[in-house]
Amino acid sequence: MLLLLLGIIILHVAVLVLLFVSTIVSSWLVSNGFSADLWQNCSGASNTWNCLASSNNEWLQSVQAMMILSIIFSVLSLFLFFCQLFTLTKGGRFYLTGIFQLLAGLCVVAGASIFTVRHTDWHSGTASFGYAYILAWIAFPLAIISGIIYVILRKRE
């Protein structure tokens, strides 16, 4: 049972790391001499980069909000897991923890989907999605899987 709990915690921390990296790193959209993320757009040569704040598009602000909400829900879920680990009665399920983790997964998929649909630079072939964008998509199924595991998990002595 201890190994199962350790595995669940490692999965949850991996989701958190993926969410933090994908939200912070400037590599959602890349091209030759150009890099963009949720917060700024950078362009330049090999040694000189000029970075400007991202546009004030409503869709970009909604992606920013969804990614931040996913981090908040995942952190709350981990905190609730540790609280419920010590306060939940024998045989109880970690429903609250699972619901918050599932909400984190839904926020990630909403944010990444909005970014995919609204960012039209990749349609023309001039730019491609960066690794931070891919990490966000990897965080989505992992968050959903960990949320389902939390809902199924029962507390034992």
Image (cartoon, helix red, strand yellow):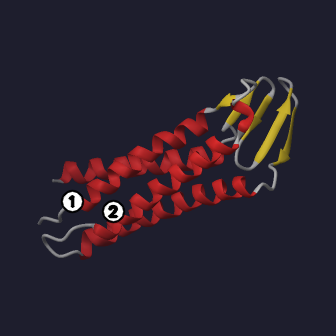
Left/right placement of residue 106 relative to residue 95 reads: right
The disc at residue 153 is 1
Please state the horizontal and vertical placement of residue 118, each as a whole percent of the image: 69, 45
Whether the residues at callouts 2 and 1 have beta carbons within 8 Å, the answer is yes
Indicate which disc, 2 or 1, sits on the residue closer to the N terminus: 2
Residue positioned 46% across, 45% down in the render = 139
Q: Is residue 27 above or below residue 99?
A: above
Left/right placement of residue 146 relative to residue 27 reads: left
Query: Which residue type carries mark 1?
Result: Leu
Mark 1 crowd level (few <14, some 14–19, many ≥20, 10 Å Cα): some
Q: Nearer the viewer, residue 99 or 122?
A: 122
The disc at residue 120 is none
Mark 2 crowd level (few <14, some 14–19, many ≥20, 10 Å Cα): many
Q: Quadrant of residue 51?
A: top right
Q: Quadrant of residue 29?
A: top right
Query: Which residue type carries mark 2?
Result: Gly
Please state the horizontal and vertical placement of residue 83, each as a whole percent of the image: 33, 72
Q: Is residue 104 above or below residue 85?
A: above
User: What residue does disc 2 label?
Assistant: 98
